[in-house]
Every structure is written in structure tokens, then in C-alpha cells.
Image (cartoon, rainbow, N blue to C red):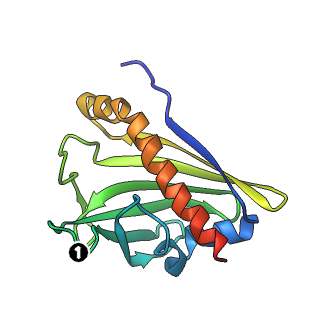
Amino acid sequence: MTAREPFRISHVANAPIGVVWNAWTKEDELAKWWGPTGLVMKVAKANVVPGGKFHYLMTNEPDAAEQFEMWGAFDYLEVDQHQRIVFVNYFSDAEGTKQRHFMNPEWPLEVQSTLTFVEDGDQTLIHLEGGPINAQPHEEDLYYENLESMRIGFSGTFAQLDDYLATR
């Protein structure tokens, strides 16, 4: 198999690095913006340290015709304050155990991502890149076929981050 380019997306946040860092690492702040647009986030736990875990529940709006819930988690591998966070993310159950995506069991079980932060005056450049790990070839194919969808999803998440940062 040939090596593939990782998923990459960058965003400029209109806030100093300390404020942006806290938004990514403080439990009460993550709960206010993380996740896909249109979903309600509930944080079960956020311990952003090497070996720590961010465990969360996403649900649709309470008045939606059909209710669903989707658990997810990050396992933190590296956390270098104001510089970099490396984590493995995955769908999970309510206890935080890795699970296959409930809507697409062919999705890779684990995706490793690296977030970097670069301060530029009163702004912070956020760069995210990653890809599947320990995946079967068909799982990798599915992941890479969905890069544009992931860009759209992360653009919505970054817009929520911007909205949150504007209130700080």
C-alpha cells in the first residue's frame, strides 16, 4: 500500500494562544463548542494530560423527531502547553470503551491526530492533521474517501470555536 497524505486543516482563531489553549484543554470550555454543528455536547470527563482522556456524549436537539446519542473519546498521548496536543480519537460507549461507528462500522476504529498552535499577536493558528491507525485497507479507503466531508465538519466545529471565543 502506498503512503497517503494525512487529513489536514488549519484555522486562525481571533484570540491569544492562552485563551485558545484553554478552549481546547478545559472541560467546561470544551463542552461549549466542541463537536459537529447542530449537536448538543455533554462532557463526561476531560483530563488533558498525557495518558488522560476526553470522553463526551453528542446528542441531537431535544425536540428532534428521532433521538440519538453518540459517544466519543480522545486518549491523549502528548500535551505540550501552548504548542501541541497528540491524541487518538474514536467512538465509544458510555464507559469510554472503543466502539465502531454506530452508523458506519467500516469506519476506522482509531484516528491519531496532532494539533499544533502558533501564536501570532492576538491570533492563534491552529493546525490539525491526522489519519487512521491500526486500520484495515478498506477502512483506510473509506477514511480517505471522506476527507472533504471531514473538512466541512471541522470548518463547522471551528466556527463554533470562533463563536465561543468571541464571548470570552
Q: Could you tell me which residue is drawn at 53 percent across and 65 percent down? A: 50
Q: Could you tell me which residue is drawn at 46 percent across and 65 percent down? A: 34
Disc 1, SS: loop
Q: Is residue 104 left or right of residue 89?
A: left
Q: Quadrant of residue 63?
A: bottom left
On-image quarter of the N terminus: top left
Q: Is residue 73 left or right of residue 105?
A: right
Q: Could you tell me which residue is drawn at 45 percent across and 44 percent down? A: 152
Residue furthest to the left: 66
Q: Tell me if residue 54 comes above or below residue 129 in the rendering.
A: below
Number of numbered discs on residues:
1
The residue identified by callout 1 is 63
Q: Could you tell me which residue is drawn at 76 percent across and 58 percent down? A: 123
Tell which of 86 and 123 is nearer to you.
123
Tell which of 146 and 14 is nearer to you.
14
Q: In the image, residue 36 lies at what x, y percent?
A: 40, 58
Q: Amino acid at mark 1?
A: Asp
Residue furthest to the top: 2
On-image quarter of the C terminus: bottom right
Q: Quadrant of residue 134?
A: top left
Tell which of 36 and 9 is nearer to you.
36
Q: Tell me if residue 71 comes above or below residue 134 in the rendering.
A: below
Q: Tell me if residue 116 comes above or below residue 75 in the rendering.
A: above
Q: In the image, residue 14 lies at what x, y percent?
A: 72, 60
Q: In the image, residue 18 lies at what x, y percent?
A: 72, 70
Residue furthest to the right: 121
Q: Residues within 10 Å of mark 1 (few under 14, many from 20)?
A: few
Q: Quadrant of residue 98?
A: bottom left
